[in-house]
Amino acid sequence: MEARLNLSQLLDKLVEKNTERAEALQSYQSRRYYRLDYTGFPTSLHAEMVVDMTYDAPATKHFQIVSQSGTQWMIERILKRLLETEQEALTEENRGRVALNSSNYNFSGLERQDSPDNCSYVVAVQPKIPNKLLYRGRIWVDSKDFAVCRIEAEPSKNPSFWIKKTDIHHSYLKIGDFWLPSENESVSVVRGGGRAVLTIKYQNYEILAARSLRGIDAGSSSSSLALPIHSN
């Protein structure tokens, strides 16, 4: 039977294991499917984009747009800007600011839920400063790997005047020894009565290079979980 951890113990494990995985994962690639649907006055709009992404440690992502269709201004001003925001989060300065740790977030309200997939610890997170790359809400943590497996949140800072509220639903899946994004759904209420739904599906993962998780110095680097926040 697994020992139940208190909040401090859980956070220590989460930061330690995130660091180990970030240090071990050297390179991977995947294909992403972006879909944006707007419903409201005066019309409904739709845009899609398929993107191949390659990651190289410690903080480089290469994006190649495979295809795009739909409303062009939505592609240019929203979908492509998501890629720019993700690149922005990888800069040396921002990596420290977006890391999921006690320097950037306050944690509270630890709960333990029965879950067949071990995604059983639930923690409330509150950013210490407003930042468009941070979020407030709840995270679910895997009880065996101490990885974030699910997030229900909203942006710490409203990304646009035209957006009243955004709810983010983000899930992760385990690929080999690593936890990587699976699906993101962001539902935004737009001023004037419209509604925008952004869906990102992450598929076709391939780990290109990785080190063994055993024997890694957990203090040698830091990791982050940065969400692709809907901005325009």
Image (cartoon, rainbow, N blue to C red):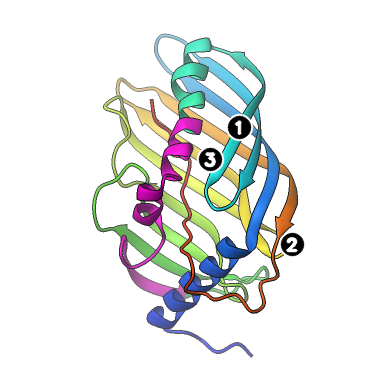
Q: How many marks?
A: 3
Q: Where's residue 216, x and y in %?
A: 60, 75
How far apart in space, not on screen, are marks 3 and 1 (Cα)?
Answer: 20 Å
Residue at mark 1? 63
Kindly identify which numbered label has been placed on residue 176: 2
Helix, strand or loop for disc 1: strand
> Where does the image place residue 33, in percent across and percent down from the top left?
65, 32
Q: What residue type is labelled 3?
A: Glu
**Could you tell which of marks 3 and 1 lies nearer the N-terminus?**
1
Q: Give left or right: position of 70 versus 167.
A: right
Crowdedness near tag 2: few (<14), some (14–19) or many (≥20) residues, C-alpha within 10 Å: few
Q: What residue type is labelled 2?
A: Gly
Along the polypeptide, which appears first: circle 2 or circle 3?
2
Q: Which region is colored magenta?
A: 83-111
Point out the image quarter for the N terminus.
bottom right
**Tag 2 and tag 1, C-beta contact below 8 Å:** no
Query: Residue at coordinates 50% horizontally, 14% vertically from top-left?
Result: 44
* Residue at horizontal 42 percent and vertical 17 percent from the top: 40
Q: Name the residue under label 3.
A: 185
Query: Which secondary structure, mark 3?
Result: strand
Up the image or down, 191 lies above or below 42; here it is: below
What is the crowding at mark 1: few (fewer than 14 residues within 10 Å), some, or many (at least 20)? some
**Magenta highlight on residue 86:** yes
Seen from the viewer's position, the closer of residues 2 and 93 is 93
From the top left corner, tell me how far across and down residue 159 is, in percent. 33, 34
